[in-house]
Image: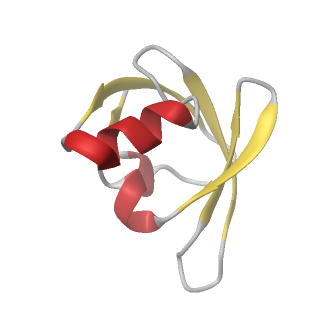
Amino acid sequence: MTLEEVKIGQTVRIARLRGEGAVKRRIMDMGLTKGTEVAVRKIAPLGDPIELTVRGYELSVRKDDAAAIEVE
């Protein structure tokens, strides 16, 4: 399952990051690394962006970026 498929209110753990180079580095720089717990707070009416709680702060990610993050 990927982060874009997670429902509002669910908390998941990041299992793997897909992607390469700058895209993967940008995701990791936001604190989204393997083993990190992520809670989905809100999803915009059209599905993009997705608001998350990561490491005690709020973060918004695009749906395309969320699709590159595998969760368990």
Task: Indicate the quadrant where residue 34 lies.
Answer: top left
Residue farthest top in this picture = 35
Foreground pick, 16 / 39 = 16
Vertical relation: 69 (above or below) 71: below
- Residue 57: image location, x then y, percent: 80, 35
Seen at 37% across and 36% down, the residue is: 25
Task: Indicate the quadrant where residue 11 lies.
Answer: top right
- Residue 35: image location, x then y, percent: 45, 13
Seen at 60% across and 32% down, the residue is: 38
Is residue 19 visible in the rendered image? The answer is yes
Vertical relation: 26 (above or below) 66: above
Q: Quadrant of the C terminus?
A: top left
- Residue 50: image location, x then y, percent: 60, 61
Seen at 57% across and 29% down, the residue is: 31
How many labels, in total? 0
Vertical relation: 59 (above or below) 4: above
Is residue 1 visible in the rendered image? The answer is no
